Structure formats: structure tokens, C-alpha cells
Amino acid sequence: MKTLTLTRPDDWHIHVRNGDVLKTVLPYTARQFARAIIMPNLKPPVTTVAQASVYRDEILQAIPEGMDFTPLMTLYLTAATSEAEIKLAAESEFVHAFKLYPAGATTNSDAGVGNIQQIYPLLAAMQRYDIPLLVHGEVTDDDCDIFDRERVFIERHLQAVVNDFPDLRLVLEHVTTAEAVQFVEAASAKVAATITPQHLLLNRNAILAGGIRPHHYCLPVLKREQHRLALLKAATSGNPKFFLGTDSAPHLTHLKETSCGCAGCFSAPAALELYAEAFEQVGALDKLEGFASFFGADFYRLPRNSGQVVLEKQQWQMPEICTSGDVAITPLFAGKDVTWKLL
Ligand code: NCD
Ligand code: ZN
Ligand code: ZN
């Protein structure tokens, strides 16, 4: 049986929500990953170190007995964030970054930033205190085609941010285009990117394959095949600027299978397996460990994990639904064959 042994990996971008959904989804991630960067887009958003501490405690409570998992917290940046809070966050043991959501760009982003110029003093403070900025990189203009929003965000805003704050550590989250890959490659070593499994495995045809497929809808939306190939090349290049961030984003099944469905793919039940499938497609399984287990930790200046996980080449079927109590969430690739299995 073909197996693949990796240093324990981490997930550098995930949504685990709170309450009953948290209890349902967290075990999937804690089983696979030693640590994860927890997104702060709750309702209401996690904007202060004090709120992150409460949220962190709730996550710690939801870790199943015997599993060893560390949540790495982030704060939601708003126009009202204070420089004092940035200092507190930088000094905190458990807050690792700020997250910039352009207002209206994605799920629970209403409290996000409307005008990036306005938060320049906050970016200066993040640079000064050396705390990373994580970016959802899309413009929100209705007159910008949805497939162009990432490229236009880079051209209009992100290029200026990295020019104006050359020492700011920045992660362009869930990159989806060849242009984003080029931007990150050309930038300094302070600039990195996460890549999701769905953007490595699917192109935009998957959203409309024989009918409308709400479980393939996430933001930034899937792009053309040429972009998927560029992402796959970046992820498997061995360049430490590109690392694993699933963006697993659970929504209740009835809120996705509706006339206006939520954005987000719930990939946590087979996250590592799906990356293995993508890397195997291009004969690059030897590059998976750097991407999954080393480069993110190095960027965040955290120790690499000790301990290992083993993946076995073995076919199994993704469940149609993940449930507990009243919570029902359809995973990415529900009912489909998965070709690797985490032991
Ligand atoms: C995320 C969510 O549901 O919170 N959705 C998504 O489509 N990716 C938000 C985000 O990461 O943009
Ligand atoms: Zn996002
Ligand atoms: Zn996300």
C-alpha cells in the first residue's frame, strides 16, 4: 500500500464559527492539523484581544478529548481599530494576525474596511509592531466583473500597500488567479499567500456542471483552468511564499441550497487528502510537506511541529452530510470518492 508520511501539518486559514457549528466542525480539523489560524468573521466580529480570548476558550472547550490542537487567533480589522489594540495584539501570546476584509466582499464582512487609505495609520502600526496582515483580496464594486475582482484589488490597492509598507508581513489569502501568484512571487519575502484545496482541484466550470452547484461556490469564486494550473504550479514549486490554508468555511446545508446561497466550501473532513490528490496530479507529492507543514510556520515565526501524520493511498467516500444535533453541513465533494486517507 502506498503511503506518505509528513510532519504534522497546520491550516493557515480556517473558519470554525462558534456555538453548535463549532462543536460539529472542529473535530475534523483537530484530527488533521496541529494548529490553525482562526478567522475572526463571527457575528459580531472578533475585533479585540479580549474577545479573541473568549473565542479561544470556546474553541479549546470544543476540542475532543485526547486531541492536541492549538487555535491561533486573529482580529478583525475595522476603521475603528485602535493603535493601542494593535500593540496589545502584537504583545499577546495567542493573537497572531489582523484580518482585512474589504466591506461587503465576503461572508460577514459588513464591518470591514470601506476605504483602505483610511486605515493607513493602522497598517503603519502593524508594520511597526511587526504583526502580520491577512487580506481577503477582492474589490467590491458592482461594476467590476466578479471574475476580475482579485486582479483589480491587487492593481488598485495591494500593490500600493506593499510599496508603502515594505516591512509589513502580509498574507494574500486564498489566491485564485495567475495574477495573484505573479504578484506574490514578485513581492519581497514579507509577502506570502495561502491556497485552498478547491482552487487547486476545480475550475469555474464546476459551479455550473450540469446544473447549479452551490457547494462549489466560495469567494473568491473559482476561476478558469489557466488560473487553476498557475495555482497548482505555485503550490508545488517549493517556494515558501505559498502555503496551506483550506479556507474551510462551513454553512448549514439549507443556507447553501437556496435561492441566494452562502459562499464557502466545507473542506475540513478531507482537507489534507484533497491537497495530496492535487499534488499527485502533477507528480509533486514530494513537495506537499513543505507546503503543508513547514512554510506557514516559518512565515508566522512559530516552531515547526514535531510528530507525523500518515496518508495512505486508499479510496473512501466523502459522506453526503456531516451532522450533529440540529447542525447539518454538506462537505465539499459530498458523496464523491477521495483517493487518499489520513490514518
Ligand atoms: C468565507 C466564510 O464563509 O466565512 N467564505 C468563503 O467563501 N471563502 C469567508 C472568506 O474567507 O472570504
Ligand atoms: Zn476571504
Ligand atoms: Zn476564509
Image (cartoon, rainbow, N blue to C red):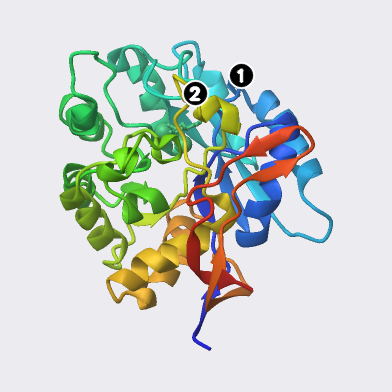
List the single residue furthest toward the bottom. 1
* Residue 129 placement, left or right of 232: right
Q: Residues within 10 Å of mark 2 (few under 14, many from 20)?
A: few
- What residue is shown at x 31% (from left), y 17% (from top)? 116
Residue 226: where, in percent of width, then height? 16, 51
Q: Quadrant of the C terminus?
A: bottom right
Quick check: can you spot residue 196?
A: no
Q: Give the residue number, with chain letter if any, for mark 1.
A: 43
Mark 1: amino acid:
Lys
Q: Position of residue 216 (x, y in %)?
A: 40, 41
- What is the three-letter code of the residue carrying label 2? Thr
Answer above or below: position of 6 versus 48: below
Q: Measured from the top left, where is residue 275 in percent x and y?
A: 43, 62
| Mark found first going from the N terminus, 1 or 2 | 1
At a point 24% along the width and 41% down the height, the residue shown is: 223
Label 2, ligand 1: CB separation under 8 Å = no
- Residue 305, quarter of picture: bottom right
Q: Is residue 315 left or right of residue 159?
A: right
Q: Answer left or right for 224 relative to 198.
A: left
Residue at mark 2: 258
